[in-house]
Image: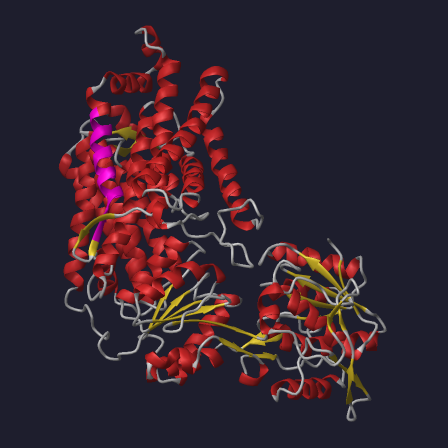
Amino acid sequence: MKKLISLLVSAALAVTSVFALAGCSGTKGSGNEASNFKVGAIYINSQNDTAGYTYAHHHGITEAMKKVGLDPAKDLYIVDNVPEDDEKVKQAIDQLAGNGCNIIFGISFGYLNAMDEKAKEYPDIIFSHATGYLSNDKNFNNYFGRIYQARYLAGIAAGYKSLALGNNNIGYVSAWGTEYAETCSGINAFAMGCMAVNPDANVNVYEIYTWGDQEKERQAAELLIDTYGCCVIAQHCDSAQPQIVANEKGVYGCGYNSDMTKEAPNAHLAAPVWNWDAYYATAMKAAMTNPATFMTEVGNYYEGLNAGLVDVSALSANCEPETKEAVEIAKKMMVNGEWDVFSGVKLSFSGAAGSVTVTKADADLLKDDGSVIVAAGGASVDDGVIQGSMDYYVKGVTQVNK
Amino acid sequence: MRKYHLVRRADSQLRRTLIFYAAGILISLAIGAVILACLGINPFEYYGRMFTIGLVGNRYGYKSIEGLLKIFVPLLITSLALSLSFKMRFWNIGGEGEFLIGAICASCIAFNSTGMPNFVTIVLMCLAAMISSGIIGIAIAALKVRFNTNETLMTLMINYIMLYVIRYIGDTKAPWNFFLREDSERPIFGSFPESAVMGGIPLGKFTLLWSVLIAIILTVIVYIYLKYTKHGYEISVVGDSSATAKYAGMSVGKIVLRTMFISSALIGLAAALTVSSAGTISDTITNDVGWTGIIVAWLSKLSVPAVFVTSILIAVLQYGCQAAATQYPAIDVNYADLLQGIILFSILVADFAANFKIVRKEDANNA
């Protein structure tokens, strides 16, 4: 009897599936032939998130699709919540390839191996991988941006605030520290932005050792304010908790990823943000025009303020009056390629609102242990250092929980 | 003062059971359909894609079948293994942990197998995984036999211990750590050398992995083992009553140790086959089979042929849910998981309703 029952479960399941199949057979495939270009995306979280990393990419992809004349409701195929597990990523790619996607974006670093392998298996599909370092010369590129430039600008805003408050201690809640170039280059650029305004500024980093944990982010911000007396809290982590804490405790802050003024109306100054649609539109256009020339047209993509890929959010009313001019000056210098953050030339801003001036001076770029990274007057470090091998803090940065 | 009473139905009718199951599934699909309709999606179209695992209009349909089989094989073997221990009333809920230790040990061999013959490597991987998982299983069984510890707690804890072990391996960049990709600044699991990747029988473009054949053969062996051997009989006697078994002169401790070893070793084998066909390892390599396997085993009432069929259906459900979600940008995996949960829950309720009825107290007295 038991066996019978269990066979019945199976039979019932099978029968239902046949019913459902019959129900659909009339509508299958509708809409698929309408447009011929399809976009595939593999997300680490859900496309229905309302903030954070996946949200930023999904927003970028859908905006870019509208720009290039595609319909995100019809031409976009998504496999979401894909962990950094080669087998699951490969299955996701097979799904997207099977649905006829012409370009597949993978947004998380751990998709590296699978995308590399599958790019060889599907030579007709363009594979595009964020934050990675692998590529080939036919159909597989990587893309990321100079977010450190936007962090430098946020640093300027923080520097003016600390100057105005007469408090040199600035806090920074960071997912990781010197383990990842992505985090420490951001911390360094932010600190250099602060010091361009307030040469005595000291950036106190609290590392939470995870990419996202709201409770830890909150505690770190509380500690930086209560114990280290920080007057501005910057962050490299997923949620707005550090800004909310700054708001509660009556200090100031710089968010990340999105304009966090709405979460912390009395505290937030300006946040470094990504405009991923700048890249996605470029990539889609190139793939739609001629996939064969994708790697020569787009190639490995690493752009910054110049391409509009990164920026600072609108400066809030909490900013000091000088901030706007200084940020615009620095931004202009980076956009036209006249100056970049990690070089042997130091910027200093001076003057009151309405007459802010910048001075360029040759100066050694120093590590926190005093050794020289770039000699005075030297050119910027290689992009490879900023993206991959940077594993130190510059002078002026202290990690409080090492 | 209870007014209502649960009474086991005296008879177990085939027709009634069938109707209850069908009703359960239809209700769950109807709930899902309401949500889909609210999102502006045609539920019939969605379910059609789901139950055909997205094969309709798929350019690489054969890859979907390969993907489905990769989900099916570990689920089948793990469910069989769990059924073995459940039959003995040994609550082995450590499938995840036993799977992971097997996967780790098999990967140790795989990552160091460059240049070795493919067949030898895979056999070694299977042996390493079976022995390591088997030892964990037998250790927990020994604690139970010797000190009467609670096997549910012990096996549950093993899951978390092993999960953190593999996370540690995956997050730690160090010279000893051959699991990771060497050229990467960030820690990331590497891929196995060719020698450790499982092949199969090519049927046109489709490749039938050896692991599928192994899983089918194993099903037959486990069926025969439980049904026609002395060991199989002993397992069911211990499960019914260990006192009876003792009275009949069986060495209960030995039977528990032996069965737990076989059960865990089978899970280890599933792990070796999985990592070998994936060509890599990760902390999500189990695909939750240690948990899903428990559901499969109980839905099948621990019957081997039913485990086989139920594993196929659950694999189709899992794969189909994801395949359908891919085709709708508004639908994410959370919906797919929700629907799976509703369907499984409804089946369990239907099963309960088919075997029990609720009666008013007076009626119960009159009956």
Quadrant assignment, res A359: bottom right
Q: Nearer the viewer, residue A207 or A132?
A: A132
Which residue, as the protein is rendered here, is positioned at the far front?
B115
Please state, as top left, top right, bottom left or bottom right, where the N terminus of chain A lies in the image.
Answer: top left
In the displayed structure, A110 sits above or below B242; it is below
In the displayed structure, A228 sits above or below A336; it is above
Residue B195 makes an appearance in the image:
yes
Please name the colour scheme applied to the rendered image.
secondary structure
In the displayed structure, B257 sits above or below B27; it is above
Magenta-drawn segment: B207-224
Would residue B111 be found to the left or right of residue A148 on screen? left
Residue A148 at x, y = what percent?
A: 63, 73
Which residue is depicted at the point 72% across and 61% down? A205
Which residue is depicted at the point 32% across and 51% down? B340
Q: Is residue B101 magenta?
A: no
Which residue is depicted at the point 22% across and 19% down? B229
Q: Nearer the viewer, residue B120 or A59?
A: B120
Residue B348 at x, y = what percent?
A: 30, 40
Residue B70 at x, y = what percent?
A: 29, 48
Residue A37 at x, y = what percent?
A: 30, 78
Residue B5 makes an appearance in the image:
no
